[in-house]
Amino acid sequence: MLQSLTSNSCVRLIQSNKSAWYFLFLVLGYVLYLIFGAVVFSSVELPYEDQRRQELRTAKRQFLQENECLSEERLEEFLAKALEASNYGVSILNNASSNWNWDFTSALFFASTVLTTTGYGHTAPLSGGGKAFCIIYSVIGIPFTLLFLTAVVQRIMVFSTRRPIMYVHTHWGLSKPLVAIIHAILLAIVAVACFFLIPAAIFSALEKDWNFLESFYFCFISLSTIGLGDYVPGEAFNQRFRELYKVGITVYLLLGLIAMLVVLETFCELQQLKQLRKMFYLKKEKPQDRLAILEHDHLSFTSVSDHTTTSLREDKTEPYVDVPDLVSPGGDDPMLR
């Protein structure tokens, strides 16, 4: 008996807090996914890092042996300055001295990466004034960019998603959820082809040191706004039409980001994904429920008021006692009169 009552209470507790349990599973799944990524990245990249460290130590040792007049301390001091400058996008190599990081087209490319939160990190402000302006510029520009992208995506969605789905639904008689799924898949395929595959082929042809995988990797890292900065186009030595190339990359990043947002918004409007999201969200209080609560509170208050008024009336009439009319026991006896 106790076991059945306990199990019933547990079932009722779980059913009454489904959203909280689903959210708990969501958090647990996200943490496990983070751990899974860390394990895979560590197991894959750690051997390459160790190999690169050994190669650098060997090259350093060989350089010191060939140049005995140079001490190890002086060499490390020089390398530290060179690496610090490289972190700000300034290189001491002869084949990189002709590329300026803060000409107009490079600054335009940097501004686009800041506003879209891509942030490759290959170029950073050097002066205190530049860093202060970057903060102010980002505080104003990032919300402005979000507003701009939201307005653009909202208008594109009308022509790219809602009208085609409604047209097929009304003229062909297909169910709206099925049409929405097929349309989302086709739109994703077109976006991948136009903003990943074709640009990757173009970058692999223009960038001498990039193969197709590295070019595709750059496109994905850029349009997903991850922006690791390990691959940045237009930084090669004697890059032809570098200014025009930088402007074209800036336009590509903005158009590609808009396309990715349109695809994501199209998938988010699918009924299946809406139902999936509702599993993890808190239930909103409906206006009908709120009205019913207010009416219930009003009725409760009215009943309490009526009860209080009635009790007060009863308390007021309580001291007065009804006295029955005296009737003469003799009736019409004249002697009693």
Image: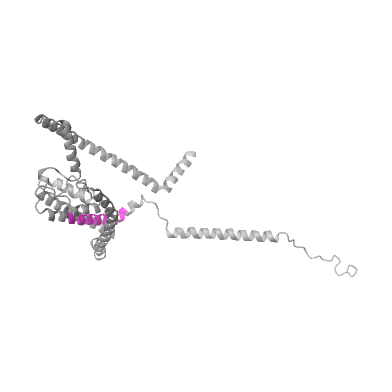
Where does the C terminus fall, quadrant-wise? bottom right
Residue 92 in the figure: left or right of residue 9: left
Q: Height in image: 170 above or below 222?
A: below
Residue 292 in the figure: left or right of residue 102: right
Total tally of numbered discs in the picture: 0
Q: Nearer the viewer, residue 295 or 68?
A: 68
Residue 272 in the figure: left or right of residue 239: right
Report if residue 51 is visible in the image.
Answer: no
Image quadrant in which you'd find residue 179: bottom left
Q: Height in image: 68 above or below 168?
A: above
Residue 92 in the figure: left or right of residue 302: left
Q: Main secondary structure of the magenta part?
A: helix
Percent across and percent down for residue 103 are: 16, 53
Q: Which residues are magenta?
A: 249-273
Percent across and percent down for residue 312 are: 65, 59
Image quadrant in which you'd find residue 154: bottom left
Residue at 66 percent across and 61 percent down: it is 313
Percent across and percent down for residue 306 are: 60, 61
Percent across and percent down for residue 80 are: 19, 37
Q: Nearer the viewer, residue 41 or 244?
A: 244
Q: Is residue 252 magenta?
A: yes
Residue furthest right as drawn:
335
Report if residue 62 is visible in the image.
Answer: yes
Residue at 17 percent across and 32 percent down: it is 73
Residue at 24 percent across and 52 percent down: it is 114
Q: Is residue 13 magenta?
A: no
Image colouring: one colour
